[in-house]
Amino acid sequence: MTDGDERAALAERAAQAGARVASDAFRTDVAVEAKGEDDVVTEADRAAQRTTIEAIRESFPDDAVVGEEEDVRKRVPDEGPAWVIDPIDGTHNFVRGIRVWGTAVAAVVDGEPVAAATVCPALDDVYTADADGAYRNGDPLSVSDVDEPRRGTVDPTLWWDHDAREEYANACEAIVTRFGDMRRLGAAQVVLPTVAAGGLEGTISNLRANPWDSVAGVFMVRQAGGRVTDLEGNRWRHDSVGLVASNGRLHEEVLAAARAIDERGVDVDGDEDGIDGNDIDGGDDIDDVDGGDGN
């Protein structure tokens, strides 16, 4: 087994381990805590992250780990191996009993993903990607072949404050005036694999996506034949501003919608001043945290 194969197998194994912990708490009376003004975290998030990290440490004890909860790194290192994890992406869905959430793990080497897995236990779906392609439940994935905007469906991955409803409405308008339909699933690491699987033609954000919300899914889209860029149309990476993922055929149209949203000032603070450097889930853009665990 090559190093890449080993990391791909471990990504799925670690995501499965974390998802089992999260699934045990789904639709139970789980305690919910506020995280910032508009975000939440549960003990299930923390427990699932600990379990996911334990699975990784069994095979790669010295690798860096980047994650949303607790004292692990918040930025992807540009050198060496690392793991990027989100124990429960779609926490708002999770606490409301909505099935659209998942546990995501990406293996990264020198800042670039080499393998990924997102386990969605409530949907009975396991998305994976390796050097050879992307898969759902073991079956190869391919982005859709839709090439007409009126037949396309796009999911905006945006967050807005309560005093910024008009700006959010503008974002919706930028999509529905360009494409046939719009969805908002509420979990970026489910949305991106859905683009990879051909269920959506694109997803957009005008903000700086946290790596745990994006890296695994971006790799899946690319391995399924899609395209992912920043707002300038350059190849997306973990520290890019803006995320535009598509089936490739409609990328210029999806990119135009993302730019229109940015120009109209939709941001997480509702300031009507474009990009503010925050993340797509409304949290803070936190510097590296060394949790003292080999990171």
Image (cartoon, rainbow, N blue to C red):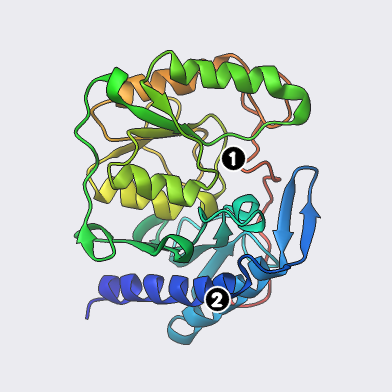
Name the residue nearer the viewer: 52 or 6: 52
Name the residue nearer the viewer: 149 or 97: 97
Q: Which residue is mark 1?
A: 280
In the picture, measured across the screen, residue 60 lies left or right of residue 290, that is: left
Residue 295 in percent (x, y) is at: 58, 71
Residue 233 in percent (x, y) is at: 37, 27
Q: Could you classify mark 1 by the number of other residues whose Cα lies within 10 Å: few (under 14), some (14-19), or many (20 or more)? A: many
Residue 117 in percent (x, y) is at: 38, 63
Q: Which residue is mark 2?
A: 53
Local SS, label 1: loop
| Quadrant assignment, res 22 | bottom right
The relative height of residue 171 versus residue 107 in the rendered view (above or below) is above
- Contact between marks 1 and 2 (CB within 8 A): the answer is no
Residue ID at (24%, 48%)? 224
Most distant residue in the bottom direction: 58
Label 1 to label 2: alpha-carbon separation: 23 Å
Amino acid type, residue under disc 2 in the picture: Ile
The relative height of residue 211 versus residue 122 in the rendered view (above or below) is above
